[in-house]
Image: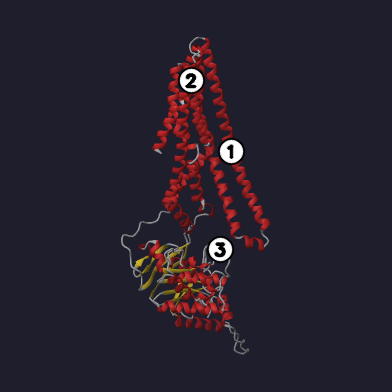
């Protein structure tokens, strides 16, 4: 930017050449009728114009590269913000705002807007030159410049609110458009197209209304500034003509002062023309500074910890959803040794998924701590912790790429052996081989070219890739058939034999057969923890007690035996045993 400012100084000095040329033509060439002098002056001003054009193009090219360097320098921070804001409970309209702000700032820095502000410090040079022509001309130019600057400040004040409202409505419109694209299948299948079209129309009309309001402010003030500049230039000619008639100035001064006045006010007019982009870029800079500061990655730990291999311990853990204050789970404490498998059980909304997100470091704890081999999760940097953790969410969340890329977590240095090992543990190797291009098959955004069961099994392979120590599976068999469930059970057994800790959330008993421990959640609290046999025995006892409490009088014939699932439903209705409510036997 310092170099660009220097070039701006050279350009502004060279811009005096046009006024000086006209001054010399009127004062020297015309009275003397000397064509040699005219030719010499013309060649000099032509050379000055060529040098000015070269430096002007060079300045514009440098500004474009400065904007690009600004973008490149922030790309890591911006991506960190995009990946962090959803975990902080940010509103949907704010999640994509950093990227829009970055584009806005880069576009402004690559435009003519910054050149106007680089040229403004040179306005006094033109004013001094006009004062040298004649004090009256200089004073007129000074008053005109002050009026233009006052109008610029008025534009800033009146456009601030309109620009912000237009930006907010644009963000809301973009959020609705993104939601429509993501859920196009549901919208079409459920006949909601017309309703979402109406919502889109309302958001778009609001955006257009705010945009018109902001544009009107810029148009009115910009046109007013342009009219004022025309008046000043014409007034300068009139004043110069009066001075010529009064024999107090020459004709060359009259013409040169008018040209120089227009040049002095040109940066202000350019600034007014790009004021909308300036306001948006300035607001974007402010938001980028705040967001990058709030989402900055924590400093790297001074010591790189080794791969955990002994235990997982949870101590008095309380977790809230991002942006909320009330804990979803609280006072959770348990520990697991290497090779153990935990069934995380509970009724819907009991906090199982919330606890699973805290165990792998997605949601930070409000109170308490999660430790691997005695070290809290925040003592690892995210990349290192990710290698030691495997996670399969309810929404598998595959990405556009090949099957192999999704399994290896898009690690360019992953070996084929590691990818094959993960696929074989997950029991998905043969399925992948039957795909059109095997491991090179592109699966599309979200894995759209795969079935739900295939997506879940590829997600399981991704979770076990790289021999992680802690593996958390949230409803891993929700879309699996009998063969898929058998493969899941086998995978859990293999992982436990390798010394991994496996935690499974499931409502289907087949996924729990390979686990030896169970934790029961009820209303966000742990009500039972221990070996699976003991926990399930307590569930059966609670089920029997609830059934006894519901039996009719002895004189009547007892009702026929009810299936376990129906008995569990009765227990939930009776609210007699929280454990029975949380686990279906």
Q: Which residue is mark 3?
A: 444
Relative horizontal placement of residue 301, taking residue 140 as reference (left or right): left
Q: Is residue 168 visible?
A: yes
Measured as percent of width and height from the top left, residue 470 is found at: 41, 71
Mark 2, mark 3: which one is toward the viewer?
2
Q: Residue at x 56, y 35 (%)?
A: 218
Q: Nearer the viewer, residue 529 or 461?
A: 461
Label at residue 39: 2
Distance (Cα) linking label 1 and label 2: 48 Å
Q: Residue at x 52, y 33 (%)?
A: 270
Looking at this rendering, what residue extends furthest in the front direction? 36
Sequence-wise first label, 2 or 3: 2
Distance (Cα) linking label 2 and label 3: 69 Å
Sequence-wise first label, 3 or 1: 1
Distance (Cα) linking label 3 and label 1: 41 Å
Measured as percent of width and height from the top left, residue 353 is found at: 49, 68
Quadrant in which the N terminus is drawn: top left
Asked if the residue under mark 1 is in contact with the one under mark 3, i.e. CB atoms within 8 Å, the reply is no
Q: Which residue is mark 1?
A: 215
Q: Residue at x 52, y 37 (%)?
A: 275
Q: Residue at x 48, y 41 (%)?
A: 110
Asked if the residue under mark 3 is in contact with the one under mark 2, i.e. CB atoms within 8 Å, the reply is no
Label at residue 438: none
Count residues near mark 1 (Cα–Cα under 10 Å), then give few for <14, some for 14-19, many for 20+.
some
The image shows residue 38, relative to residue 188, as above or below, that is above
Q: Is residue 529 visible?
A: no
């Amino acid at each position: 930017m310092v170099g660009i400012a220097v070039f701006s100084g050279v350009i502004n000095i060279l811009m005096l050449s046009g006024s000086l040329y006209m001054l010399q033509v009127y004062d020297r060439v015309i009275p003397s009728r000397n064509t040699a002098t005219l030719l010499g002056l013309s060649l000099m001003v032509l050379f000055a114009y060529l040098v000015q054009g070269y430096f002007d193009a060079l300045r514009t090219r440098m500004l474009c590269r400065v904007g690009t360097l600004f973008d490149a320098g922030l790309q890591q921070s911006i991506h960190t913000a995009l990946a962090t804001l959803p975990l902080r409970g940010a509103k949907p309209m704010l999640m994509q705002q950093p990227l829009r702000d970055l584009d806005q700032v880069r576009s402004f820095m690559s435009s003519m807007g910054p050149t106007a502000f680089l040229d403004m410090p040179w306005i006094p040079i033109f004013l001094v030159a006009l004062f040298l022509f004649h004090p009256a001309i200089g004073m007129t130019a000074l008053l005109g410049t002050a009026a233009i600057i006052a109008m610029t400040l008025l534009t800033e004040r009146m456009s601030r609110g309109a620009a912000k409202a237009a930006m907010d409505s644009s963000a809301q419109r973009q959020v609705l458009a993104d939601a429509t694209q993501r859920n196009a299948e549901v919208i079409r299948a459920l006949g909601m197209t017309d309703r979402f079209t109406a919502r889109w129309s309302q958001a778009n009309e609001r955006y257009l209304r705010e945009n018109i309001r902001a544009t009107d402010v810029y148009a009115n003030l910009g046109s007013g500034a342009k009219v004022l500049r025309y008046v000043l230039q014409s007034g300068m000619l009139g004043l110069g003509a009066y001075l010529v008639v009064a024999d107090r100035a020459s004709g060359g001064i009259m013409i040169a002062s008018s040209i120089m006045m227009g040049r002095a006010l040109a940066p202000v007019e350019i600034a007014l023309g790009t004021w909308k982009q300036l306001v948006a870029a300035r607001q974007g800079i402010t938001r980028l500074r705040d967001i990058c500061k709030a989402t900055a990655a924590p400093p790297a730990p001074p010591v790189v910890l080794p791969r955990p291999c002994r235990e997982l311990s949870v101590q008095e853990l309380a977790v809230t959803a991002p942006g909320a204050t009330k804990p979803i789970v609280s006072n959770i404490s348990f520990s697991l040794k290497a090779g153990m498998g935990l069934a995380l059980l509970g009724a819907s909304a009991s906090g199982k998924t919330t606890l699973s997100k805290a165990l792998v470091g997605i949601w930070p704890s409000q109170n308490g701590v999660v430790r691997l081999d005695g070290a809290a999760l925040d003592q690892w940097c995210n990349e290192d912790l990710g290698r030691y953790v495997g996670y399969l969410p309810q929404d598998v969340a595959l990405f556009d790429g090949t099957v192999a890329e999704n399994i290896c977590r898009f690690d360019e240095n992953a070996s084929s052996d590691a990818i094959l090992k993960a696929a074989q543990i997950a029991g998905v190797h043969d399925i992948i081989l039957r795909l059109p291009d095997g491991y090179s098959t592109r699966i599309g955004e979200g894995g759209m070219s795969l079935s739900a069961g295939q997506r879940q099994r590829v997600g399981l392979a991704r979770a076990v890739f790289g021999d992680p120590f802690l593996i958390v599976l949230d409803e891993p068999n929700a879309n699996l058939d009998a063969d898929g469930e058998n493969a899941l059970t086998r995978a859990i057994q293999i992982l436990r034999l390798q010394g991994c800790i496996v935690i499974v959330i499931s409502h289907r008993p087949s996924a729990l057969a390979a686990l030896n421990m169970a934790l029961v959640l009820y209303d966000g609290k742990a009500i039972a923890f221990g070996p699976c046999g003991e926990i399930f025995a307590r569930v059966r006892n609670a089920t029997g007690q609830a059934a006894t409490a519901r039996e009719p009088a002895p004189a009547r014939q007892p009702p026929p035996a009810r299936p376990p699932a129906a008995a569990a439903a009765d227990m939930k209705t009776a609210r007699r045993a929280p454990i029975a409510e949380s686990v279906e036997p």
